[in-house]
Amino acid sequence: MMSAAAVQAIDLVKWFGKGDIKTYAVNGISFEAKYGEMLYIVGPSGSGKTTLLSMISGILRPNSGRVMVKGQEIWTLPPNDIADFRLNNIGFVFQDYHLFPKLTTVENVAIPLILKKQDWDESLQIAMEFLEVVGLQDRAELPPVKLSGGEQQRVALARAIASGPDILIFDEPTASLDGVTGRRIIGFIKERLLTEHRSILIVTHDSRIFEYGDRIIKMEDGKIVEVTNGGTREE
Amino acid sequence: MRFPLPGLRLNGILKIAFKLLVNDRGKFAALIVGITFAVFLMVQLTSVFAGILSKASATIINIGASVWVMDPAVNNPLNSIQLPDYILDATRSIDGVNYAVPLYSGAALVKLHDGTYQPVSILGLDDSSLVGRPELIQGKIEDIFADNGFIVVKDEEFPKMGNPKIGSTFEINDHRGVVVGIARVATSGLFGMPTLYTTFKRAIQYIPSPRFTMAYILVEPKSAADIPYIKQEVAKSGYLALTNREFQERIANYYKYQTGIGTNILIMTLISFMVGLSICGQTFYTFVLENMEKFGALKAIGAKGYELVYMILFQALFTGFTGYGLGVGLSSLLITVAKRNVPNYAASITFFNLGLAFAMVLVIVAVSSYIAVRKVIKIEPFDIFRG
């Protein structure tokens, strides 16, 4: 049964350091990300966006609070099960893409499928279909270093969606793209990847793409200071 | 912690590991060259030593007697100490001895047709039995009893005798020698001297001898079970009885521990190992460091820690085994070519050498991958997000 919220963060707290040098990166944050929603998490550097993203994606264990993804409280799972949960339900696009330069583009896209025990050839075949989705089928056999920044971003996108995750997480997706390419990519994400069964969370401080967000959560000093909805301020 | 069996998923992961490794051509080449070179040196050095040991035991291997009786001070065949005659009688009278015969072993100078002198090794076989006789490739063994008859061994030293034929003559201590047969043996000697076989009586007649003449007594026991008793009885007379293998080990130990050859070769082998270890350890560590973010990304996507460990181990083992194969191949090639072109080249690849080099490669692989695995296990995917 599908949960009403794709992601629920409940009173999340994360600090680093000890004693006097203890610093709160996230301090009592609660929010929901719904299916069919593109949610932005924005804020200045050091506001705790990345820490929050890491906790809700099962990468960084919170000091307190709960994270429910698709109705599953992920931090109660054993470490290997969290990894499996991530693999099956969450797709990542990293800021620097983290593509493997020694693999071909199609092999890069196939990685999540290979990690999911799919047969090698079958994985490449499926990866090829996702490369077609992002319009890079003619670049399949090239190494990623031969592609432009925008193309690499699309390869990372194809990799993130290849395993069919319901949650997509983007970390600064437009940070290394020019304005036109950045808007084109976000437009593509919203138009082609956002479905009623999928929730997309984007961490960014690129105000040029704010217009595409369904909701925008603004963070400062580890706390949510503002939530706006479709460009309209929401109390 | 669950430790799942490798399945299809690992096959794909190992394929990724393989591609990451071999597609990084510069580093892969450096790793392969490092291990190949180390294995080549290790196999080469230990093979040369094995060759030296084999050649040092040539007399024992070629004569092939089951039990050798000798003076306890003898530690290699060149330095035989002559035994008094009564020891032969005493040995023959031991229960369990099927037969016991004397062997002459010594060196002499022969004067060749062209007037040059050539040092040779002489083996004098028991006249009545010819125990320890070599396999003839020309001539008949009974001709050894003919006047001045000698059999020449056709090995790497054979040309030093002027490539004699049956009927060729030479001088030995003003006695005439006639080649009556040409033989082959399993292994030639270490010191580059041609080997001549003759009868015991002729040997002591032609070559100046001290008071005693027997270098060894060759014993054939009635059964292997009699050997301990024979050794015990010989020891009571103050002499030493060793089986063929024990005598070879005694010679090997002498060269290993009393001549410095073994120590020096061991040191050189260890240096080769250290060179291989440092090249591979460092290169592999750099390779893993450069891929650290990628491993972190894999972990973030959903790879588990043990899967990354498998990747590292696979890469290290693949490199190690490939380098091992190439190193052994290269070494075999060099030894084959050298043996064809350099007379007396003492090298033989044994299973022990191969095993030793393989063990050292495993150590190199283990150390290299341990350093890398420690690093990879500690990767936090969170660091990938932080950039």
Image (cartoon, coloured by chain):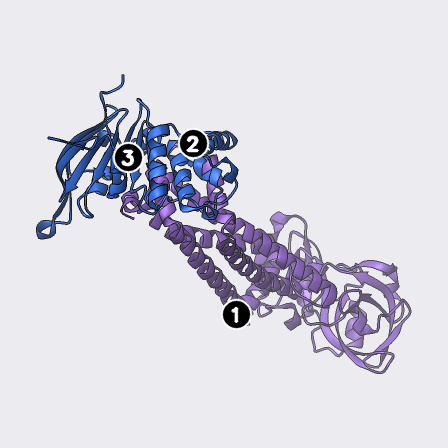
Chain colours: A blue, B purple
Q: Residue at coordinates 81% horizontally, 82% vertically from top-left?
A: B116
Residue B95: give x, y in percent of width and height: 64, 53
Q: Which residue is mark 3?
A: A79
Q: Nearer the viewer, residue A60 or B4?
A: A60
* Residue kind at label 2, given as amino acid type: Leu
Tell me the residue that label 1 is attached to.
Answer: B264
**Chain hosting mark 2:** A
Closer to the observer: label 2 or label 1? 2
Instruction: Verify CB contact (< 8 Å) between mark 2 and mark 1.
Output: no
| Crowding near the residue tagged with mark 3, few <14, some 14–19, many ≥20 C-alpha atoms within 10 Å | some
* Residue at mark 2 shares a chain with residue at mark 3: yes
Q: Residue at x 27, y 19 (%)?
A: A2
Q: Residue drawn at (79%, 81%), measured in percent from left and top?
A: B117
A198 shown above or below A221: above
In which quadrant of the rendered image does the N terminus of chain B lie? top left
Comparing B37 with A232, the one in front is A232
Q: Do dots 2 and 1 share one subunit? A: no
Q: Which residue is mark 2?
A: A113
Q: Horizontal and vertical percent for residue B31? A: 50, 56
Residue B192 located left or right of residue B115? left
On residue B56, which mark appears? none
**Considering only vertical position in the picture, is A117 above or below B184?**
above
User: Looking at numbered disc 1 in the image, what kind of residue is underneath it?
Assistant: Asn
Query: Which chain contains the residue that carries disc 3?
Result: A
Confirm whether circles 3 and 1 share one chain.
no
Q: A4 and B272: which one is in front?
A: A4
